[in-house]
Amino acid sequence: MTELDGSVRVVGPDGPVPFVDLFEGRDELVVYQHMWHDGDPVSGQCPGCTVNAWHVQQAAPYLRARGVSFAMLTEGPWAEVVPFLRFMGYTEPWYSVRGLPAPVGVDMGHIACFLRDGDRVYLTYRTTGRGNEPAAGIFGLLDMTPYGRGEAWEQVPDGWPAGQASCWYWATDADGEATWGPTRRPTPQWTRPGAMPVEP
């Protein structure tokens, strides 16, 4: 475990609050650390983090039932984050950690777990990349299907569909086709009311 300063202030809907307040009086806290691209529109925010955020937010009520608090952290400036949250329909607590030191304010794209002992706060676990996959149900479901994830690195029998580059699920165009092109949005955004095709 690594102790950190629980008094560092994060910015949320009610202004700056100490990080320790994110525990909401509980002893354990799980956070997802969402990347941010300053000045980019909603459709230009990190598609990988959007995949993770889409899944982990749904876990929050279950975590709370177990006595574990949940929050989303982002390095984005709060004024830019608010329209993104509104568009995505996110209702769980989000906070800007812009300019804060590690492990709270750097290395986004991670799931991190913290323990509170009174006013003392400890980082107990962090993961990123494929380590985030257990929190995203789509991977477990795809792993149960006959063709699996359909990624290029997988060995498949002759006659099966060729795999695609990993992260194909992160961003799609209005027709649902995986793309990194100028018409892409993070995949979950297409389910949001008002999501329109991106103009190249």
Image (cartoon, rainbow, N blue to C red):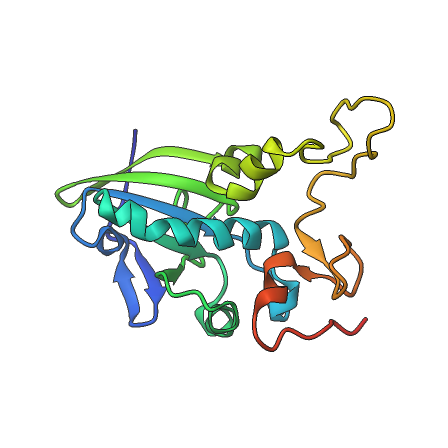
Q: Quadrant of residue 183?
A: bottom right
Which quadrant, please, contains the N terminus?
top left
Task: Tell me the quarter of the image containing the C terminus.
Answer: bottom right
* Residue 139 falls left or right of residue 160: left
Residue sitting at 34 percent across and 61 percent down? 93
Residue closest to the far bottom = 194
Task: Establish if 135 lies above or below 196.
Answer: above
Q: Nearer the viewer, residue 71 or 190?
A: 190
| Residue at x-position 61% and y-position 56% | 46
Q: Nearer the viewer, residue 29 or 57?
A: 57
In the rendering, at what x and y percent does residue 81 appear?
48, 68
Picture coordinates of residue 61, whole percent (x, y): 30, 52
Residue 128 visible in the picture: no
Q: Residue at x 56, y 59 (%)?
A: 36
State the residue in front, 181 or 65.
65
On the picture, is 135 further left or further right than 153? Answer: left
Q: Residue at x 41, y 54 (%)?
A: 57
Number of numbered discs: 0
Q: Position of residue 100 (x, y in %)?
A: 40, 53
The residue furthest right is: 159
The answer to whether residue 167 is left or right of residue 115 is: right
Does the rendering let one see residue 13? yes
Expressed as whole percent of the image width and height from the top left, the position of residue 80 reads 51, 72
Identify the residue at the far left of this view: 118
